[in-house]
């Protein structure tokens, strides 16, 4: 079982490419991993060459996958496809524990009767795909991912057959989720990791300083590039402008705080960098499809 110790703070955010395909055993291309995300500023962005399925054993925090940001809590699972940059951060003052299965589904499931489309990991991504699955909303998918993560880490009789069977069942259930890309619509991953890496220092800075007054000239200086180059980099990597990404980050952090905190809506808005309640309400509704108060009411009713 591999263990990653959270990296110490670095001056520049970078990709941490963990366990390239050559590290996945040929007999059973799957590996177990345990991660304890800290609450410190983001020091690196992960990007893999294989499917990463994770299960949160304890703690709360956020997961960012590309331009999407999700809250998580114990019992949630994550689905991250090859070459999608991502990071996890525990809620301030806490430390979470995650367990992962790193997989190559097409190599694991060799049964010629199985649907190749079900094993296509590239369909499990896109702007609408829910990379973080909550157990109350997706109980079957969460249970299957947890069983698969446990089995990959286990040393039990017939483990290999169990991993292969659970991989097939899990992939089948994941392909029933909303927001998947249509087959063949997934973009090529060739140049994207490099594009994201070029703006990684700015992504890290936003993750740490999102509540402060930030503008494009400052964000460009973090990367040591011109404003035009930074805008071009964001467009190439995320299909967003730096301002759009910042606003989305603030809104999704606020959505997480509305769930976890009893603070007023105004206090949360100000704590996430919005200068007025009207601006917060406008941007929150644009991203979440409802007002902050309706969002909090929905969470409390669930």
Image: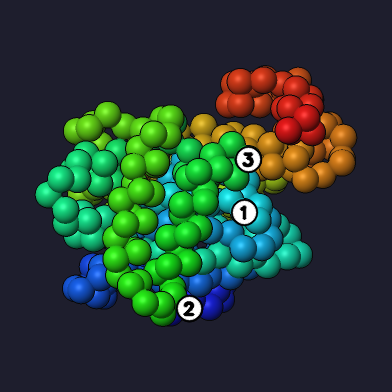
Q: In front here: 32 or 277?
A: 32
Residues under numbered marks 1 and 3 in contact, where contact means CB atoms less than 8 Å apart = no
Residue 149 appears in the figure: yes
Q: Is residue 176 above or below residue 156?
A: above
Residue under the image location 55 percent in, 74 percent down:
6
Kindly identify which residue carries mark 3: 136
Disc 3 and disc 2: Cα gap in Å? Answer: 29 Å
Q: Is residue 27 left or right of residue 267?
A: left
Instruction: Tell me how far mark 1 sits from mark 2, CA to CA.
Output: 20 Å
Q: Which mark is residue 161?
A: none
| Percent x, y of residue 121 | 29, 46
On screen, 228 above or below 30? above
At mark 3, the secondary structure is: loop
Q: Which residue is mark 2?
A: 3
Which of pointers 3 and 2 indicates the residue nearer the eye? 3
> x%, y% of residue 210?
64, 46
Please state the horizontal and vertical placement of residue 13, each as a whole percent of the image: 46, 63
- Residue highlighted by disc 1: 75
Q: Dividing the picture into quarters, in which one does residue 47 lie?
A: bottom left
How many angstroms separate mark 1 from mark 3 (CA)? Answer: 9 Å
* Residue 38 as seen in the image, left or right of residue 226: right
Q: Say which residue appears at 53% left-offset and 78% top-offset.
A: 5
Compared across the picture, whether 197 is left or right of 246 comes to: left
Q: Secondary structure at mark 1?
A: loop
| Quadrant containing the N terminus in the rendered view | bottom left
Going by the image, does 100 lie left or right of 134?
A: left
């Amino acid at each position: 079982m591999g263990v990653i110790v959270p990296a110490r703070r670095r001056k520049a955010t970078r990709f941490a490419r963990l366990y390239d395909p050559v590290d996945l055993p040929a007999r059973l291309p799957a590996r177990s991993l345990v991660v304890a995300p800290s609450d410190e500023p983001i020091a690196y962005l992960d990007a893999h060459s294989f499917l990463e399925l994770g299960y949160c054993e304890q703690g709360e925090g956020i997961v960012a996958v590309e331009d999407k940001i999700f809250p998580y809590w114990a019992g949630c699972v994550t689905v991250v496809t090859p070459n999608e940059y991502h990071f996890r951060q525990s809620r301030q003052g806490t430390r979470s524990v995650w367990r992962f299965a790193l997989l190559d589904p097409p190599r694991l499931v060799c049964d010629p009767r199985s649907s190749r489309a079900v094993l296509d990991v590239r369909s499990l991504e896109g702007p609408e795909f829910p990379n973080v699955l909550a157990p109350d909303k997706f109980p079957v998918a969460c249970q299957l991912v947890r069983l698969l993560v446990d089995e990959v880490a286990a040393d039990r009789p017939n483990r290999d057959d169990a991993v292969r069977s659970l991989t097939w069942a899990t992939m089948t259930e994941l392909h029933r989720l909303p927001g998947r890309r249509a087959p063949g619509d997934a973009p090529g991953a060739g140049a994207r990791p490099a594009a994201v890496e070029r703006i990684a220092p700015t992504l890290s800075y936003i993750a740490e300083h999102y509540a402060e007054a930030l503008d494009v000239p400052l964000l460009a200086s973090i990367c040591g590039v011109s404003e035009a180059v930074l805008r071009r980099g964001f467009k190439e990597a995320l299909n967003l402008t730096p301002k759009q990404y910042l606003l989305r980050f603030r809104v999704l952090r606020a959505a997480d705080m509305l769930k976890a905190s009893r603070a007023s809506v105004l206090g949360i808005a100000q704590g996430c960098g919005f200068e007025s309640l009207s601006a917060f309400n406008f941007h929150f509704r644009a991203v979440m499809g409802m007002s902050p108060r309706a969002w909090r009411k929905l969470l409390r009713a669930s």
